[in-house]
Image (cartoon, rainbow, N blue to C red):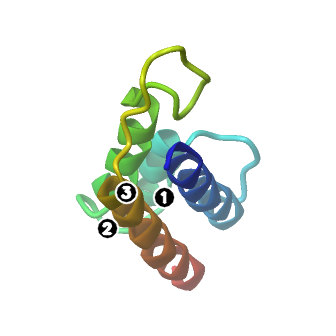
């Protein structure tokens, strides 16, 4: 579940870097950049940030952890579906 969340967010981050014309920026900053460039409207840019923050807040997702894994199947499925929709959306802006 943790790799699903991590990789789904990374895919959106990669697409956002391509759209913004940047390389290696983190998704929360890219969401602001794309809004500032009027590529995506505010507050819709916030929809890109929240799963990114979720990924960073879950033990064992962003970095290995000795703690019990916390991402549930339904959480991973939600993030995966969000990522698919986000990649399609970003490919059109």
Left or right of residue 56, residue 22 in this image: right
Whole-Å distance between the Cαs marked 3 and 1? 30 Å
Which image quadrant for residue 73? bottom left
Residue that badge 3 annotates: 73
Q: Position of residue 43 (x, y in %)?
A: 23, 58
**Dot 1: element:** helix
User: Residue at position x 54%, y 73% from top?
Assistant: 87
Q: Give the mark, 3 or 1, whose residue is nearer the N terminus.
A: 1
Q: Is residue 17 above or below residue 70?
A: below
Task: Determine the residue positioned at 36% across, 39% down.
Answer: 54
Residue pushed farthest left?
Answer: 43
Q: Mark 2 — residue?
A: 41
Say which of 1 and 26 sits in front. Answer: 1
Image height check: is 68 above or below 53? above
Instruction: Residue 93: give x, y in percent of width and height.
Output: 51, 79
In the drawing, does residue 80 fall left or right of residue 50? right
Q: Which residue is mark 1?
A: 34
Looking at the image, the residue that sits furthest to the right is 23
**Identity of the residue drawn at 31% across and 60% down:** 74
Per the image, label 2 sits on a secondary structure element best described as loop
Q: Earlier in the sequence, mark 3 or mark 2?
A: 2
Q: Are marks 3 and 1 in contact (CB under 8 Å)?
A: no
Q: Which mark is residue 91?
A: none
Question: Observer-nearest residue: 86 or 20?
Answer: 86
| Image coords of residue 77 (percent x, y) | 39, 65
Badges 3 and 2: C-beta atoms under 8 Å apart? no
What residue do we see at 38% from left, 42% from top?
71
Mark 2–mark 1 Cα distance, whole angstroms, equals: 8 Å
Horizontally, residue 25 falls left or right of residue 12, namely right
For label 3, the SS is helix
């Amino acid at each position: 579940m943790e790799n699903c969340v991590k990789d789904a967010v990374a895919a959106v981050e990669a697409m956002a870097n391509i759209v913004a014309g940047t390389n290696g920026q983190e998704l929360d900053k890219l969401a602001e950049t794309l809004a500032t460039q009027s590529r995506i409207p505010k507050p819709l840019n916030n929809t890109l940030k929240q799963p990114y923050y979720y990924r960073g807040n879950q033990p064992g997702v962003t970095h290995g952890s000795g703690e019990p894994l916390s991402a549930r199947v339904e959480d991973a499925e939600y993030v995966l579906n969000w990522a698919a929709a986000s990649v399609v959306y970003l490919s059109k802006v």
